[in-house]
Image (cartoon, rainbow, N blue to C red):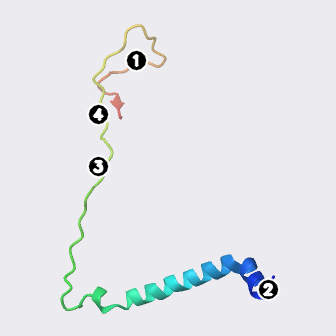
Amino acid sequence: MSGLRRFWHNYKVLIVMGSGLGFIHWGWYHIKSSPLLHQNRNEYVPEPGIVSYVAPGPRPCLPSQSGPQRGRRRTRPASDSLTELSCW
């Protein structure tokens, strides 16, 4: 096997990936420096920020409207059902 063939066989991934990465950076550099993509600062008008969604706050705790349930034994002392708060 010749020296060049052996070099290509041993380092072909490095050669292909290195040159590809170099060409990608070179192309990106030229795209960024293109005057067609740059906007004149005198014509630039900034747009106001737009809020598309505002999350609602937590739901308030409301007095419980349900009375005592039948068939269930109370494990705590009875209290007025309108003073109990239920948050969901």
Please report the residue visible at 18 percent of the width from the left and 88 percent of the height from the top.
43
Residue type pointed to by label 3: Pro
- In space, the residues marked 3 and 1 are separated at their CA atoms by 35 Å
Q: How far is the residue under mark 3 from the one under mark 4?
A: 17 Å
Q: Which is in the foreground here, disc 1 or disc 2?
A: 2
- Between the C-alphas of marks 2 and 3, the distance is 72 Å
Give 86 or 46, whichever is nearer the viewer. 46
Q: What element carries label 4?
A: strand
Residue topped by disc 4: 62
Which one is in front in this view, the residue at disc 4 or the one at disc 2? 2
Q: Is residue 30 above or below residue 64?
A: below
Specify the quadrant that holds the N terminus.
bottom right
Near-viewer residue (18 or 86):
18
Quick one: label 3 or label 1, which is nearer the N terminus?
Answer: 3
Does residue 78 appear left or right of residue 8 in this picture?
left
Q: Residue at x 67, y 76 (%)?
A: 13
Which residue is label 1 attached to?
A: 78
Q: Please tell me in which quadrant of the rendered image residue 82 appears.
A: top left
- On residue 23, the disc is none
Q: Distance between the residues labelled 1 and 2?
A: 96 Å
Q: Residues within 10 Å of mark 3 (few under 14, many from 20)?
A: few
Asked if 76 appears above or below 3 in the picture, the reply is: above
| Residue placed under numbered mark 3 in the picture | 56
Question: Which label number is shown at residue 2?
Answer: 2
Question: Is disc 4 surrounded by few (<14), some (14 to 19) or many (20+) residues within 10 Å?
Answer: few
Cα–Cα gap, marks 4 and 2: 86 Å
Distance between mark 4 and mark 1 Cα atoms: 19 Å
